[in-house]
Image (cartoon, grey):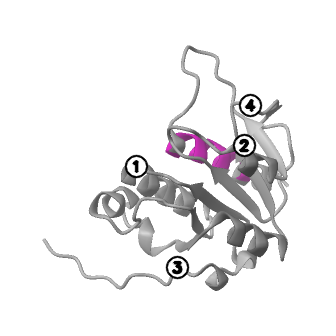
């Protein structure tokens, strides 16, 4: 089977943040399955798209495309370095929410402002501390069992649905 498609322009300045209340920002993800699943989750919650920070896996790789189950074609994708992303983010409305094991605030406690930019870190290391410091909110998900963290795609889905559920309740 052969598929033909046109790759997207991934310039950050092509993103119109006003088109969606949720955006997903992925920092240095390495697993194409995670990235594809995150794109699929973004589509499911009506996110505007995915912004890739630093050196992420190729969203157009075969495994990533397969994991999107077609969501690759419904989500905007942009790529940027962290300083460029921060400059762009701070130039307009948007709340940057990071997830971290070091956070003290439960992810269900805050009211998320639109647009919400959900920042998810690398699968192995999570978010760098200097990235965490730039977040408007830093939240954590309770881990009641023996596991100390969730898979990056799962954590993103939990956060995205929390933001969506808050919006639906308003």
> Are dots 4 and 1 in contact, CB under 8 Å?
no
Res 107 visible: no
Residue 20 in picture, x, y percent from top left:
70, 71
Q: Earlier in the sequence, mark 1 or mark 3?
A: 3
Q: Earlier in the sequence, mark 3 or mark 4?
A: 3
Is 160 part of what is drawn in magenta? yes
* Foreground pick, 21 / 12: 12
Q: For the magenta stretch, what is the residue range?
A: 153-163
Distance from Cα at disc 2 to Cα at disc 1 = 21 Å
Q: Earlier in the sequence, mark 2 or mark 3?
A: 3
**Rendered position, 111 above or below 84:** above
**Rendered position, 29 above or below 125:** below
* Mark nearer the viewer, 4 or 2: 2
Res 52 visible: yes
Q: Which residue is mark 4?
A: 102
Q: Which residue is mark 3?
A: 10
Quadrant of the image containing the N terminus = bottom left
Q: Earlier in the sequence, mark 4 or mark 2?
A: 4
Quadrant of the image containing the C terminus = bottom right
Residue 97 in picture, x, y percent from top left:
76, 51
Question: Residue 89 lies in what quarter of the image?
Answer: bottom right
Q: Secondary structure at mark 2?
A: helix
Q: Which mark is residue 31?
A: 1
How many labels were placed on the picture? 4
State the residue at coordinates (62%, 49%): 120
Distance from Cα at disc 2 to Cα at disc 3 = 26 Å
């Amino acid at each position: 089977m052969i598929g033909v498609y046109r790759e997207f322009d991934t310039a950050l300045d092509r993103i119109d943040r006003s088109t969606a209340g949720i955006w997903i920002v992925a920092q240095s993800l390495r697993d194409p399955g995670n990235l594809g699943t995150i794109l699929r989750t973004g589509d499911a919650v009506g996110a505007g798209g995915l912004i890739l920070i630093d050196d992420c896996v190729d969203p157009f790789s075969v495994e990533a495309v397969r994991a999107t189950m077609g969501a690759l074609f419904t989500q905007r994708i942009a790529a940027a370095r962290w300083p460029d992303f921060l400059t762009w983010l701070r130039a307009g409305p948007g709340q940057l929410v990071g997830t971290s094991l070091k956070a003290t605030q439960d992810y269900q406690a805050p009211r998320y402002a639109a647009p919400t930019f959900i920042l998810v870190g690398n699968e192995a290391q999570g978010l760098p501390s200097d990235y965490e410091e730039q977040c408007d909110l830093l939240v954590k998900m309770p881990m009641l069992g023996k596991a100390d963290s969730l898979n990056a795609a799962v954590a993103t889905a939990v956060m995205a649905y929390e933001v969506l559920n808050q919006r639906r309740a308003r």
